[in-house]
Amino acid sequence: MKVVIFFALLAVASAKRLFHQDQVLRIQPGGYDLKIINNLVERYPNIDFWAEPSLVRPVDIHVPRVHLTAVKVFLTRNRIDYEIFIEDLQVAIDNQKSDRPTQMSLATFDYNVYHTMDEIRAWMSDMVSTYSFVSQVNVGQSYEKSSIDALRITRSTSFNPPKFVLDCGLHSREWVAPASCLYAVKYLVEAQPGSAEYNILNEMEIVVIPIANPDGYEYSWTGDRMWRKTRSDTGHVCMGVDPNRNWDANWSGPGASASSCNDAYYGPSVMSEIEVRSQASFVGGLSNVQAYIDIHAYSQYWMYPYAWTYSKTSDENLLNTIGVNSVNAIRDVHGMTYLTGSISEVIYQASGSTVDYMYDTLGIKCSFAAELRDTGRYGFTLPERFIQPTAEETFAGL
């Protein structure tokens, strides 16, 4: 009997999470007390804020079917208006990507579909073998012993060209972020002599980490499409740590959670996650890094430090100028509106973030965080038809 129970539990633990009849509700900013919204998490721990509570922007809440009626009653009783943004989350997930053959070679690689971890690894290898000015370097290792790798792209003959690091896929479920980074590499390697992209590579080196959290990304394909964190065993009730709350940048402060079951869990200790330590060591070991960007989704923001405090950096004017130029370049491509400003003011306070660490600890003045498409209609389930336009405008911003 014990053996039967064990295998039954194992089957449940390894089953793929489904989201049938779960909904995503949107609450418009203002007109309510933030404490009331935050009480939802205490009452119903399984709900998931896709966009955190705020008085200046909409709040998106993924509500599991089992809590749906109770949450709607709670909101109605507290006179909080809401609209249903995603009627059935599983349907949205099923419609997000197409069924297709596995793509393990550059010759058949389609940039307009979402790719598995294995496909991305094969693509990286093919990039190196196809283009002499592309090399692959190891960033480090994940909790589950997966290799974290980066592509270094440059035509510069300088011994130490200025470097721009693109960090993608830190949050597992934000698939359009790494998809846009793959497109960025495509634009760079296929650039023709005389083009702006070609000239950029003559002058500097672009370092792209396509998937900074491989365990989480893999799990978002095989186990839980809405998984955000790492996959480490922290010794607590729930697995994983938010790798964008674990950095040594006011760690465990405002905008990070002490609960292991919260998607913004800051971890058992500062820099506890090997993925975080690996990237910190890798970027810190590069010389002449002039710019860094941590690419996420969604909400359409192009932001800079600080995240943990409302205080301004000493480079506020420069960073704001770059941010304004970037969002203008983005708008010129497909007319999409992105907001720029410091993270704490544009989106929310977030302690332990990559961008604050890169700016303060590593001294990378031009440190940015991007939130790509969309503004919530699809959220983390952005369909594949939006990959190319998102990538095109993202590259303009970069």
Image: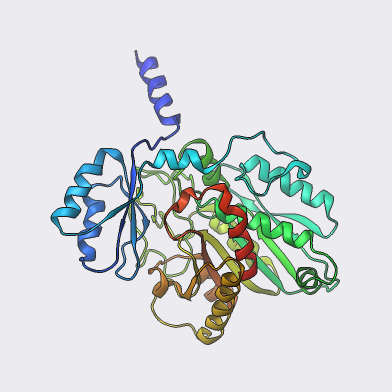
**Residue extending furthest toward the top:** 1
Residue toward you, 211 or 116? 116
Task: Say above or below: 295 vs 118.
Answer: below
Q: Is residue 308 visible?
A: no
Task: Say above or below: 21 vs 30.
Answer: above
- Residue at 65 percent across and 40 percent down: it is 118
**372 on left or right of 70:** right
- Residue at 40 percent across and 58 percent down: it is 266
Residue toward you, 298 or 112? 112
Q: Position of residue 241 (x, y in %)?
A: 44, 52
Q: Is residue 31 visible?
A: yes
Task: Say above or below: 149 vs 101.
Answer: below
- Residue at 64 percent across and 57 percent down: it is 181
Which corner quadrant holds the N terminus? Answer: top left
**314 on left or right of 135:** left
Which corner quadrant holds the C terminus? Answer: bottom right
Q: Position of residue 17 (x, y in %)?
A: 42, 35
Residue 49 position by quadrant: bottom left
Q: Which colour assignment does the render follow?
A: rainbow
**Residue extending furthest toward the left:** 77
Number of numbered callouts drawn: 0
Q: Position of residue 33 (x, y in %)?
A: 20, 66
Residue toward you, 157 or 341? 341
Residue 397 position by quadrant: bottom right
**Residue extending furthest toward the front:** 335
